[in-house]
Image: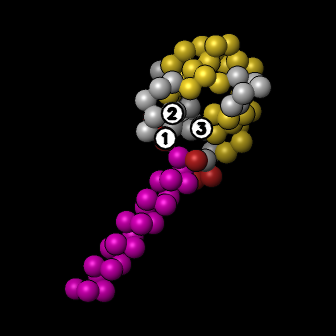
Amino acid sequence: GDLLPADGVLIQGNDLKIDESALTGESDHVRKSLDKDPLLLSGTHVMEGSGRMVVTAVGVNSQSGIIFTLLGAAGDDEEDKKDRKG
Protein backbone atom coordinates (compact mmCIF):
# COMPACT_ATOMS: atom_id res chain seq x y z
CA GLY A 1 0.00 0.00 0.00
CA ASP A 2 2.92 2.43 -0.48
CA LEU A 3 1.87 5.76 -1.94
CA LEU A 4 3.86 6.88 -4.99
CA PRO A 5 5.08 10.43 -4.29
CA ALA A 6 6.08 11.26 -7.89
CA ASP A 7 5.42 10.39 -11.54
CA GLY A 8 7.94 8.12 -13.19
CA VAL A 9 8.84 5.38 -15.63
CA LEU A 10 9.33 1.83 -14.42
CA ILE A 11 12.88 0.58 -15.03
CA GLN A 12 12.75 -2.62 -12.97
CA GLY A 13 9.70 -4.47 -11.73
CA ASN A 14 8.60 -7.73 -10.16
CA ASP A 15 4.88 -8.55 -10.51
CA LEU A 16 3.96 -4.92 -9.85
CA LYS A 17 0.27 -4.05 -9.45
CA ILE A 18 -0.90 -0.49 -8.84
CA ASP A 19 -4.20 0.89 -7.52
CA GLU A 20 -4.91 3.90 -9.75
CA SER A 21 -8.47 4.44 -8.48
CA ALA A 22 -7.56 7.82 -6.94
CA LEU A 23 -6.84 9.19 -10.43
CA THR A 24 -8.98 7.10 -12.77
CA GLY A 25 -11.84 5.83 -10.62
CA GLU A 26 -11.13 2.31 -11.89
CA SER A 27 -11.19 -0.14 -8.97
CA ASP A 28 -9.15 -2.92 -10.66
CA HIS A 29 -5.44 -3.04 -9.95
CA VAL A 30 -3.27 -2.29 -12.99
CA ARG A 31 -0.33 -4.57 -13.81
CA LYS A 32 2.79 -2.57 -14.69
CA SER A 33 5.76 -3.93 -16.64
CA LEU A 34 8.69 -2.61 -18.65
CA ASP A 35 7.16 -3.55 -22.01
CA LYS A 36 3.49 -2.81 -21.22
CA ASP A 37 2.31 0.30 -19.37
CA PRO A 38 5.54 1.36 -17.58
CA LEU A 39 4.20 4.77 -16.45
CA LEU A 40 3.70 5.22 -12.70
CA LEU A 41 1.67 8.16 -11.41
CA SER A 42 1.88 10.04 -8.14
CA GLY A 43 -1.04 9.57 -5.79
CA THR A 44 -1.45 5.90 -6.71
CA HIS A 45 -0.75 2.97 -4.39
CA VAL A 46 1.46 -0.10 -4.85
CA MET A 47 -0.70 -3.12 -4.05
CA GLU A 48 1.59 -6.01 -5.01
CA GLY A 49 5.14 -6.59 -6.11
CA SER A 50 8.08 -4.24 -6.20
CA GLY A 51 9.91 -2.03 -8.62
CA ARG A 52 12.22 0.87 -9.33
CA MET A 53 11.40 3.93 -11.36
CA VAL A 54 13.05 7.00 -12.82
CA VAL A 55 11.23 10.07 -11.53
CA THR A 56 9.92 12.30 -14.31
CA ALA A 57 7.78 14.84 -12.40
CA VAL A 58 7.13 15.96 -8.82
CA GLY A 59 4.83 18.39 -7.04
CA VAL A 60 2.67 20.63 -9.22
CA ASN A 61 4.25 19.13 -12.37
CA SER A 62 3.05 15.60 -11.59
CA GLN A 63 -0.32 14.29 -12.77
CA SER A 64 -1.91 14.58 -9.33
CA GLY A 65 -0.34 18.03 -8.90
CA ILE A 66 -1.84 19.19 -12.19
CA ILE A 67 -5.25 17.89 -11.16
CA PHE A 68 -5.08 19.62 -7.77
CA THR A 69 -3.92 22.85 -9.42
CA LEU A 70 -6.83 22.74 -11.86
CA LEU A 71 -9.29 22.00 -9.06
CA GLY A 72 -7.88 24.90 -7.05
CA ALA A 73 -8.11 27.20 -10.06
CA ALA A 74 -11.73 26.18 -10.59
CA GLY A 75 -12.46 26.93 -6.93
CA ASP A 76 -10.81 30.35 -7.27
CA ASP A 77 -12.97 31.11 -10.34
CA GLU A 78 -16.12 30.30 -8.38
CA GLU A 79 -15.03 32.59 -5.53
CA ASP A 80 -14.29 35.39 -8.02
CA LYS A 81 -17.78 35.05 -9.49
CA LYS A 82 -19.36 35.24 -6.01
CA ASP A 83 -17.28 38.33 -5.17
CA ARG A 84 -18.38 40.11 -8.35
CA LYS A 85 -22.07 39.38 -7.69
CA GLY A 86 -22.13 40.33 -4.05
Left or right: 49 as drawn, with respect to 79 = right
Relative side of 10 to 63, left or right: right
Find out whether the residues at labels 3 and 2 contact each other: C-beta distance under 8 Å: yes
| Residue pointed to by mark 2 | 20
The answer to which image quadrant residue 31 occupies is top right
In front: label 3 or label 1: 1
Q: Position of residue 10 (x, y in %)?
A: 72, 28
User: Against 14, is 41 above or below?
Assistant: below
**Residue name at image x 39 percent, y 73 percent:** 77
* Amino acid at the residue labelled 1: Thr
Number of numbered discs present?
Answer: 3
- Please name the residue that numbered disc 3 is placed on: 41
Q: Secondary structure at mark 1?
A: helix
| Residue 46 position in % (x across, y down) | 54, 23
Disc on res. 24: 1
Label 2 sits on what residue type? Answer: Glu
Per the rendered image, the range of residues in magenta is 64-86
